[in-house]
Amino acid sequence: MKRDFMFTSESVTEGHPDKLCDRISDAIVDHFLRHDPFTRVVTECAVATAIVFIAARFESDALIDFTKIARQVIKQVGYEQPSFSAKTCSIVTSLKELPTSEYRHFDEQKLSDLEIEEIVVKNQATVFGFACNQTPALIPLPIWLAHQLARRLREVRVQNILPYLTPDGKTQVGVEYRDRQPCRIHSITIIASQYPLDHVASPDLKQLQEDIRTTVIEPVFETEIIEPDPDTRIFINPDGPFIIGGPAAHSGVTGRKNAIDTYGEYSRHSGAALSGKDPTRIDRVGAYAARYAAKNIVAAGLADECEVQLSYSIGLARPVSIQVETFGTGKIADEDIKVLLEKHFDFRLAGIIKQFNLRFLPALIKGGFYKQLATYGHVGRTDIGLVPWEETDKIALLTEGKKVF
């Protein structure tokens, strides 16, 4: 395994077409669950110039205006340009309401342990969770920094610090590692979309580059331990001005940014989309449970890095396989960590929903819960209040009777 290397991760703003689709899909999930916590729904979205397409299959007692929700999200993101606007874009839907099934109405909060065992998964999935000690959030430094820059790029637009920016943007950070620990910032890339150059407030490329350095890059690194040095390569719109951006420039689809949603490719992630699914979908909530397990292992000091793999098969309640990899950083054997996970974590579908209260979070979190996860990562979040799989409340159980070096 490499000890010295350079690794790069990217993030995008909420105005990127793929992320716009994720936000629309998860806003629909939030609305369903807020009005009927026992909804089953899978919804996907695609956007292109002046058009939005929404496909959904659902089983619910709630009445949802898909078109209204989509327009609200588009407006909140900030698309009011002639080429793509919440008011004028065409929205096409393909909706299928499923017949009511007895399976939908199980309430995991009221089930006994034996009854939880009878709630089986309805789709097969292999999911991954990862954690490492590179950042306070216990996620890899490249994706952490890429998210911080993307979030700041949004802030300077929304707060009118750089009023000429439009919602679409990308960030990328390369980090050099020595002995598998980050040691310096190799490179930073920011792609910021702007109004046309003849717009009254839009600057030339040189001024934009200076503005991004002073209002985005410098504030983000003020609080970071590792900062850019004189040899750090910084690229801001290196291909020239990026005009307008968004769906008018490139299309988007739900679930196409899985690496950005998780660990920035530093660790493995499942191929299934996380957004647009209710909590009974194990390919979504299983990924959260795996992250919860991996994070608690690292937080407990049992490893510096930990990847947890869960494999599920249709018709079974428990994963058919649990695998642990600590990349040589474990303080105890990986097999012993696996035994601890099997003892102290519930990886059954109904157990995960119960542990994380996943049906009711949209009603408890202002502004919706799943919609907020749709940008800047489903893991490692420290900015939106309660994210239950980010809790490290299993440390005492994991270290009970063990000496951790």
Image (spheres, helix red, strand yellow):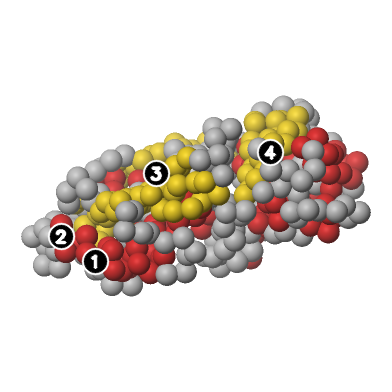
Q: Which residue is mark 2?
A: 206
What amino acid is labelled 3 in the image? Asp
Q: Going from the N terminus, do you reach mark 2 or mark 1 first?
A: 2
What amino acid is labelled 2 in the image? Lys
Label 3 Cα neighbours within 10 Å, binned few <14 / some 14-19 / many ≥20: many
* Residue at disc 4, secondary structure: loop
| In this rendering, the label closer to the viewer, 1 or 4 | 4
What amino acid is labelled 1 in the image? Asp
Q: Going from the N terminus, do you reach mark 1 or mark 3 first?
A: 3
Q: Residue at x 38, y 69 (%)?
A: 219
Kindly indicate whether the residue at mark 3 contacts the one at mark 1 (C-beta within 8 angstroms).
no
| In this rendering, the label closer to the viewer, 3 or 2 | 2
* Residue at disc 1, secondary structure: helix
Q: Going from the N terminus, do you reach mark 2 or mark 4 first?
A: 2
Label 1 Cα neighbours within 10 Å, binned few <14 / some 14-19 / many ≥20: some
- Disc number placed over residue 211 in the picture, else none: 1
**C-alpha span from label 1 to label 4:** 43 Å
* 25 or 241: nearer the viewer: 241
Kindly indicate whether the residue at mark 4 contacts the one at mark 2 (C-beta within 8 angstroms).
no
Quarter in which the N terminus is drawn: top right
Q: Is residue 212 left or right of residue 355?
A: left
Q: Which residue is mark 3?
A: 18
Residue 227 position in % (x across, y down): 42, 61
**C-alpha span from label 1 to label 3:** 26 Å
Q: Is residue 14 visible?
A: no
Q: Which residue is mark 4?
A: 328
